[in-house]
Each structure stands twice: as structure tokens, then as C-alpha cells.
Image (cartoon, grey):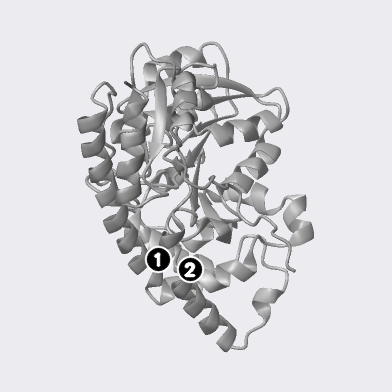
């Protein structure tokens, strides 16, 4: 009898609705598209993608990716400015290894993506939070922080942020790049939600700023294709690129993920990635509208701004402890993510995050109704 081993990272108990889950719904994972792309690539008879890969990543794949990005990012992207990664998490860890040492200071948004904070802890970095508002980083606070400490980099999720859903305005992006040049620190822009725009187009990607020599734009296929691919990219200036591609890890193991990248190349070249993105925009955009209406109707005490893109709703209930709310919610077989998870200073106790990525509209409605009972 075959043992029942676990395959996926997160298992939700039967009968539970985890509205905090940030993973895509299995129904949104394009098995058929990837099967066809793999069959096409295998059918060509070329075995090079089974070999150690070029350190920067397969040039043909980078050329296909550059075409996709040039169409969707608002500026022209050159394939030589792209480096292929095994997803954003490993890219962040690699960049910490190359550009920091334990004890160095970095800046992050408050709130910030909580699992990135774990990576920074692993590298022994001193994390300084910078306040945000509905237009992203409050740069006056950042200027004040720069008078006290100099960061090696600032980590931002500039578009449809996790968890807040907010987007860093174009004007503040310009100002942030100028600060990076003036004070000589890097901007690590995690742009994983850049393409998931439902009602309002975002500002241009940080990839448009790489000529400043202070920007690294990070992207991933996890949200627009499938997280199990463990495939992504970064875009940066050649002065930074050369330090990355000459590191010992790549010298030993070659480029990251040549096998997966050549399959995704077929998908891009066939138009499959564009078709999948169009499907996601339709499905997830509808879920955002539905959740917004349900929250306004059933949990009116929760304050929020409906997101224009991405996965997440960021809710504020003054006077409430979201950790206690989570305990009540779990007793009602529904879950959320309390704001303290996303704080590098144990704050944000009155906030919590919900997601539209993991369930269709029927389960979202049932989850909100269960959550409503927790407020009685």
C-alpha cells in the first residue's frame, strides 16, 4: 500500500476555510498549458536543458521573457539585464549573502511580507521598519531614518503589496531612487504582483530604474503561472549583475532551473502565458469585487480600501486584537492572518489580512459569513 506522504507546503484541515491563505487555488494552476509546453520542448529532441545551465540563465529563455516583460511592464527590457532565479525567496537569500553580512542594517516597509522578514533574520540583519500609508513608503520617515543609520538595502513590495494591497506612487518611486543614489543603498523591489491589476494600472516597474545602478527588480512565475515551478528572475544593471553571476554557488552548480525555464519558454512563445494571465485577471478580479461587497455588508466595523490588484485585503478594526480574533475564527473553522505577523516591531495588532487567491466566490462568501459570527 502506498504511504500517504505530504506533497504541498500548506494543508488546510477538512471543513476549514482559510481566508488568510496566500497560495493559488489548485483550480487556477494551468496543468494543461504546462503539459503542452513540456511536450513541445521534449519533442524538439534538444538535450541541452538537461545540462548545467549558463550562470545568468538560458539566453533563449531570457529573450522570450524580455519580450513578455517589455509588453507588460511599461518599459523596454533587455535580455542581458535579466538573471534567472529559483523564485524570489531564494533570490532574496542569495542577495543577502552577496551584499550583506550579519549585523548590517536594512530597511523594510511596515507592514512587510512576513516570510521575507524570516529570510532577513536568517542572515542576522538588523531590520528597521519604515511607515507606510495608502501611497506606500512615507519618505519623510525614511529620510529621518537615514539620518540615524545607513542601510545596505531597502526591501519593498511596491505594487499591490503583501499584505496591505497598497501601491507605491510614481512620485515616491522617483524620490526613493534619488535617495538610494544619494545615500548609496540598494532597492530590492519584490514585484510579484505587478501583472495582477484589476481596476487600476500600476506605475512602471522598478526595472525601468536599473540605470541608476541602485535597483534590483525581482519577479516570479509563482503568482502568474504556478509556485511549484520555483522559477523567477531579477532585472538589474550590469555593474550589479556581474557580482551576482560570478558568485561561487553559480560557478559550482551553473544557472538556476534550466529545466523548468526551457518549458516556460515554450509557454511564453506560444502565447500560453498571456492567455493564463488573462484568465487570472478575470477570475481574481471578480473575487476581489465579491469579497469587497461581502465585507462591507457583513463586517462593516472592518475598515479597508478595496485593492486594485494582487491577492490581499488589509482590514483594520480599531480596538480589536487580531490574534484573539484569529482564535475565535479558528473555532468557527475559518482563518485569517493577524497583522502582527507582518510587523518587524510587533505592532499592527488591530489589523488582519484576507486573501482571494485560494477559494472561489462561494467559499469566500461562506468564509466571510463565518468570520461575521466572530464579531457578534
Position of residue 217 relative to residue 267, above or below, is above
Q: How crowded is mark 1: few (under 14 residues within 10 Å), some or many (20 or more)?
A: some
Q: In this view, does 367 lie to the left or right of 100?
A: left
**Could you say which is closer to the camera, residue 126 or residue 206?**
126
Residue identified by numbered label 2: 63
Q: Percent position (x, y) of residue 269?
A: 42, 75
Q: In this view, does 95 lie to the left or right of 369?
A: right
The mark found on residue 324 in the picture is none
Q: Percent position (x, y) of residue 321?
A: 44, 16
Q: How crowded is mark 2: few (under 14 residues within 10 Å), some or many (20 or more)?
A: some
Q: What element carries label 1?
A: helix
Q: Is residue 4 left or right of residue 162?
A: right
Q: Residue at x 37, y 48 (%)?
A: 194
Q: Which residue is drawn at 66% across and 66% down?
A: 54
Q: Percent position (x, y) of residue 276?
A: 37, 65
Q: Quadrant of residue 254?
A: bottom right
**Could you say which is closer to the camera, residue 183 or residue 286?**
286
**Could you say which is closer to the camera, residue 198 or residue 265?**
198
Residue 366 seen anywhere in this rendered image of the structure: yes
Q: Residue at x 73, y 67 (%)?
A: 2
**Could you tell me how far apart the alpha carbons at marks 2 and 1 are, in whole angstroms?**
6 Å
**Could you say which is closer to the camera, residue 64 or residue 369?**
369
Residue identified by numbered label 1: 67
Quick check: marks 2 and 1 in contact, CB under 8 Å?
yes
Position of residue 67 relative to residue 152, above or below, is below
Residue 60 seen anywhere in this rendered image of the structure: no
Q: Is mark 2 on a helix, strand or loop?
A: helix
* Quadrant of the rendering where the N terminus is positioned: bottom right
Q: Percent position (x, y) of residue 184?
A: 54, 28
Q: Which residue is drawn at 55% across and 11% down?
A: 148
Amino acid at each position: 500500500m502506498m504511504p500517504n506522504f505530504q506533497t504541498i507546503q500548506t494543508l488546510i484541515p477538512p471543513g476549514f476555510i482559510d481566508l488568510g491563505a496566500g497560495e493559488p487555488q489548485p483550480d487556477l494552476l494551468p496543468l494543461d498549458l504546462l503539459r503542452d509546453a513540456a511536450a513541445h520542448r521534449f519533442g524538439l529532441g534538444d538535450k541541452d536543458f538537461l545540462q548545467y545551465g549558463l550562470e545568468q540563465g538560458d539566453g533563449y529563455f531570457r529573450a522570450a521573457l524580455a519580450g513578455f516583460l517589455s509588453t507588460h511592464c511599461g518599459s523596454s527590457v533587455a535580455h542581458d539585464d535579466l538573471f534567472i532565479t529559483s523564485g524570489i525567496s531564494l533570490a532574496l537569500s542569495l542577495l543577502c549573502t552577496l551584499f550583506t553580512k550579519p549585523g548590517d542594517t536594512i530597511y523594510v516597509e511596515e507592514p512587510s511580507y512576513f516570510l521575507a522578514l524570516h529570510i532577513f533574520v536568517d542572515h542576522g540583519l538588523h531590520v528597521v521598519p519604515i511607515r507606510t500609508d495608502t501611497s506606500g513608503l512615507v519618505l519623510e520617515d525614511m529620510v529621518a531614518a537615514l539620518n540615524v543609520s545607513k542601510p545596505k538595502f531597502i526591501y519593498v513590495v511596491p505594487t499591490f503589496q503583501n499584505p496591505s494591497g497598497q501601491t507605491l506612487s510614481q512620485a515616491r518611486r522617483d524620490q526613493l531612487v534619488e535617495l538610494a543614489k544619494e545615500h548609496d543603498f540598494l532597492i530590492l523591489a519584490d514585484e510579484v504582483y505587478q501583472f495582477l491589476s484589476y481596476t487600476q494600472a500600476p506605475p512602471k516597474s522598478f526595472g525601468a530604474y536599473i540605470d541608476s545602478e541602485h535597483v534590483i527588480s525581482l519577479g516570479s512565475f509563482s503568482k502568474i503561472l504556478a509556485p511549484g515551478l520555483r522559477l523567477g528572475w531579477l532585472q538589474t544593471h550590469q555593474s550589479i549583475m556581474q557580482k551576482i553571476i560570478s558568485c561561487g554557488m553559480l560557478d559550482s552548480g551553473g544557472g538556476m532551473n534550466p529545466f523548468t525555464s526551457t518549458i516556460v519558454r515554450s509557454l511564453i512563445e506560444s502565447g500560453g502565458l498571456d492567455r493564463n494571465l488573462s484568465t487570472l485577471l478575470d477570475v481574481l478580479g471578480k473575487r476581489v469585487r465579491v469579497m469587497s461587497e461581502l465585507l462591507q455588508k457583513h463586517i462593516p466595523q472592518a475598515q479597508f480600501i478595496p485593492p486594485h490588484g494582487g491577492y490581499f485585503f488589509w482590514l483594520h478594526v480599531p480596538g480589536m486584537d487580531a490574534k484573539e480574533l484569529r482564535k475565535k475564527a479558528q473555532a468557527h473553522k475559518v482563518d485569517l492572518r493577524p497583522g502582527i505577523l507582518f510587523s518587524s516591531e510587533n505592532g499592527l495588532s488591530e489589523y488582519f489580512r484576507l486573501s482571494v487567491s485560494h477559494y472561489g466566490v462561494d467559499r469566500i462568501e461562506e468564509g466571510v459569513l463565518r468570520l461575521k459570527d466572530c464579531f457578534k
